[in-house]
Each structure stands twice: as C-alpha cells, then as structure tokens.
C-alpha cells in the first residue's frame, strides 16, 4: 500500500521533465497473531467436550524492489515498481491446554516475483499565494506474484490435520487480485517543514479463485470480491540541516466487507493504523538515503516494518 510521500520526494514536487529516478529498496515486514480454537462440541454454555488449542501465526516478509520514476513534464510523473519477495512463516499450535500440552509446529516459505505495479502522479496546481499543493495519483497493481490460492495447504487427512488444516505448505508472493488505487496528496510548505496528507481508495477487482478443500477434495471456484479500503495519512516532514530531514506520520485504514459469490463474508471488515518514522539523508546531489520504520496499531497490520531506499536521479 502506498502512503503519502516523505520529505525526500516532496521537493520539486514531482520528478522534473527529462529526469529519471532509479530507486532500489529493501523492505522487511513482521506479522504475528494468536488464535484460540476448540476442536470439539459444547453441550451447554461453559462446558465443552474436545480439545482447546492455541495457535500462533508468524510471518516475515522481505521485499527487494526497484522503482523507476520518470518526469514526462514538470507536472506529470510515471513510475513502475518490480518487487522480488521472500515470504517465510510458521504456525505453532499448543494442544490441548494444560499439563499435557503438545506443541505442533509447521514452517513454510515462498520466494519469487511479487506483484508488479504501475503508477502516475500529476501536480494539479503550483501552490502559489499560500495555497497547498495538490497531487493526484493513480496506481495499478498486477497479479504477477504467486497467489495465496495457488499454494498447497495441509488437509484434514494429513498428520495433525485436525489442528493445522488450511495452513499453507508454501507461501504466496502476491495477493491474487488486480488493484486500482486512486489517491490525492496535499502538501503545505511551512518552513522549515512540510505538512502533508494523503487520501486514497483501494479497489480490488473481483476474480474467480480456486478455494482449496480442507478435506483434500478438488478446489471449488469461488468469485471473491475483497473489501474496499479507504485510507488517510497525515504527517509532517522537516529539515534537520541542509542534508538530513525527518518525517513523522500516521495512517488509518478501514477495510469494508468482502464477498464470496455475492454473499457477505462474516467478520471480514476491520480497521488498523500505522505510525511511521522516516529519516532522509542527501549523500550527494544525485543520491539520497531514506530509512523509515512503521509500527502497527491493531492485529491486522505488521507489528514492525522497516524500509530502506537509495534513490539515484539523473537526466536523459
């Protein structure tokens, strides 16, 4: 998901006409989630026959990417991002609870091309007479990565399948859905800093996906429509000196109901937030170093996120 630009990319505001920026980056995301489950039945509230078990999911995603941005005019910029993803995760279940608890653990990973993205940004005004600068953005994400619906899963017929059924044996490198993301960025220079905000709306195109059978039978084609997800980001970027700059921002996202074959999926809506801290350093006139850290607020966002970028610009 794209957020409002850091101070290092606010500057001009966009890449000037005839200039190219090559931006290699490495991003690390860490996810962790705990779930409590019951493999049994309940006769009256509070009395359950069967096994109660706790499952912990952990996921470590490392993405190496190259983003290329080019100035078509002084107000129009085109960009493309090619990611390569290493996705490593583990699932641990403690069953049953108590002194005789047994730990079941399974690990999986995925390595390969991620979902390639194409985008454009257009500066709508000059920001004169005290007006903020408005920039319209549009992002299109493809499905070039491995889809979560393409990877094999543990079935109930496998060893300990009654507790681990549905757990992937390999991990995806993409989402499996085409995504359209229009957004509007607002920038207000207030020397020595820049106030910024970003409003975006992410729309995933519905697709028929092969949903795998936990019992081990053939997959079932299901038309899936992920929920729309609007987001707002706001923050400030300010110069520490003539080379270094600091940015602070917060992003809040809400994901609406998802649908399967036109029917609402119960429990699919959720919200989450992310606090972002960024530091930029101008190494030379053409090269800059950016480092940002994100801290998730809520169970559905990465607990930690680190992004390292080294953009290099040159003229044609």
Image (cartoon, grey):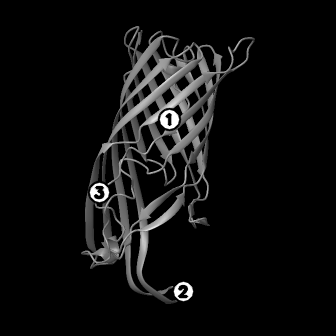
Q: Nearer the viewer, mark 2 or mark 3?
A: 3
Q: Please state which of the two labelled residues, at mark 1 or mark 3, is closer to the viewer.
A: 3
| CA gap, disc 1 and disc 2 | 44 Å
- Residue that sits furthest to the left in the current view: 159
Q: Which residue is mark 2?
A: 45
Question: Can you tell which quarter of the image residue 136 is in?
Answer: top right
Name the residue at the bottom extreme.
43
Whichever of labels 1 and 2 marks the residue nearer the N terminus, that label is: 2
Residue 268 location, x and y as percent? 56, 61
When asked about the image quadrant of residue 307, the answer is top left
Q: CA distance from mark 1 to mark 3?
A: 30 Å
Compared to residue 181, the image places residue 205 above or below, namely below
Q: Are marks 1 and 3 in contact (CB under 8 Å)?
A: no
Going 45% across and 36% down the picture, which residue do you hit? Answer: 117
Q: What is the number of the mark on residue 170?
A: 3
Query: How far from the left and from the top, in percent, is residue 99?
Result: 28, 78
SS state under label 3:
loop
Left/right of residue 185 with respect to residue 52 in the rendered view: right
Name the image quarter holding the C terminus.
top left
The disc at residue 276 is 1
Which residue occupies the foreground of this view, 23 or 224? 224
Q: Nearer the viewer, residue 220 or 293?
A: 220
Alpha carbon distance from label 2 to label 3: 38 Å
- Kind of element beneath mark 2: loop
CB of mark 2 within 8 Å of CB of mark 3? no
Question: For the point 56% across and 37% down, which residue is it?
Answer: 250
């Amino acid at each position: 998901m794209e957020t409002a630009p850091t101070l290092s990319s606010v500057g001009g505001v966009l890449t000037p006409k005839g200039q190219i920026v090559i931006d290699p980056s490495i991003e690390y995301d860490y996810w962790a989630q705990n779930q409590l489950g019951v493999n049994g039945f309940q006769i009256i509230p509070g009395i359950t026959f069967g096994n109660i078990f706790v499952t912990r999911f952990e996921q470590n995603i490392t993405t190496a990417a190259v983003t290329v941005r080019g100035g078509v005019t002084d107000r129009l910029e085109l960009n493309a991002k090619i990611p390569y993803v290493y996705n490593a995760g583990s699932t641990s279940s403690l069953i049953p609870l108590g002194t005789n608890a047994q730990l079941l653990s399974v690990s999986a990973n995925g390595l390969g091309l991620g979902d390639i993205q194409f985008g454009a940004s257009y500066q709508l005004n000059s920001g004169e007479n005290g007006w903020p600068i408005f920039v319209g953005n549009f992002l299109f994400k493809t499905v070039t990565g491995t889809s979560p619906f393409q990877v094999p899963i543990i079935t109930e017929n496998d060893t300990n399948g009654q507790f681990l059924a549905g757990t992937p044996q390999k991990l995806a490198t993409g989402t499996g859905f085409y995504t359209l993301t229009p957004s509007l960025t607002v920038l207000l220079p207030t020397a020595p800093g820049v106030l910024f905000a970003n409003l975006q709306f992410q729309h995933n195109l519905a697709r028929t996906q092969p949903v795998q059978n936990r019992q081990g039978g053939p997959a079932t084609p299901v038309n899936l429509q992920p929920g729309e997800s609007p987001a707002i980001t706001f923050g400030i970027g300010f110069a520490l000196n003539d080379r270094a700059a600091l940015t602070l921002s917060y992003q809040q996202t809400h994901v609406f109901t998802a649908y399967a074959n036109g029917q609402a999926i119960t429990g699919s809506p959720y919200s989450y937030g992310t606090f972002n801290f960024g530091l930029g350093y101008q190494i030379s006139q053409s090269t800059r170093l950016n480092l940002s850290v994100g801290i998730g607020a809520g169970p559905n966002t990465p607990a930690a996120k680190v992004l390292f970028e080294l953009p290099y610009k040159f003229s044609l």
